[in-house]
Image (cartoon, helix red, strand yellow):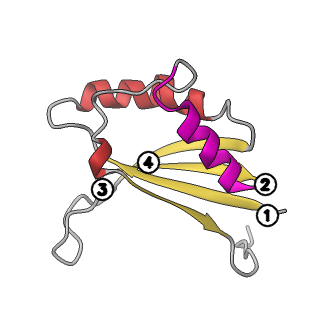
Amino acid sequence: MPGRSLFLVFTQPVDGQEEEYNEWYDVIHLGDVVQIPGVSSAQRYEIAEPEPVAGRTVHRHLAIYEIDGDPGRVLDEMRTRFGTDRMRACPALDVPATAMAVWTARGPRIVAEP
């Protein structure tokens, strides 16, 4: 059985709908996602340096979900729930611009000494 994985989701709001997008993500979506068995936490981030990297524009928003166990089962459940009352969608989310991937740990975790 797999251990802990990270599901990283890079997103953008539809132009002109940033407020609606942030409200939905912060107040509704994160709470919907952590109701899925196997999702142990969810947190959003905004890019600190929004300038293009190597001539390419990058996503400005990132959500990181910690998954315990089989990420395939969790992702299947997310797909089943998305757009239903159990995981409400938002028209302010630019779905075609979304990029996502599951990451698993490789090697030991090194923690800095205090």
Q: Is residue 100 left or right of residue 67?
A: left
Marks 1 and 2, how far apart at CA: 5 Å
**Which numbered disc flags the more N-terminal residue, 4 or 2?**
4
The one nearer the camera, 12 or 50, is 12
Residue 111 x, y percent position in the rendering: 73, 71
Amino acid type for the residue under numbered disc 3:
His
Magenta range is 70-84
CB-based contact (under 8 Å), mark 4 and mark 3: no
Q: At numbered mark 2, what does the secondary structure look like: helix, strand or loop?
A: loop
The residue type indicated by label 2 comes to Gly
Q: Which residue is mark 1?
A: 2
Mark 2 — residue? 69
Q: CA distance from mark 1 to mark 3?
A: 29 Å
Q: Position of residue 18 (x, y in %)?
A: 25, 32
Cα distance between the residues tagged 1 and 4? 26 Å
Q: Residues within 10 Å of mark 2 (few under 14, many from 20)?
A: some
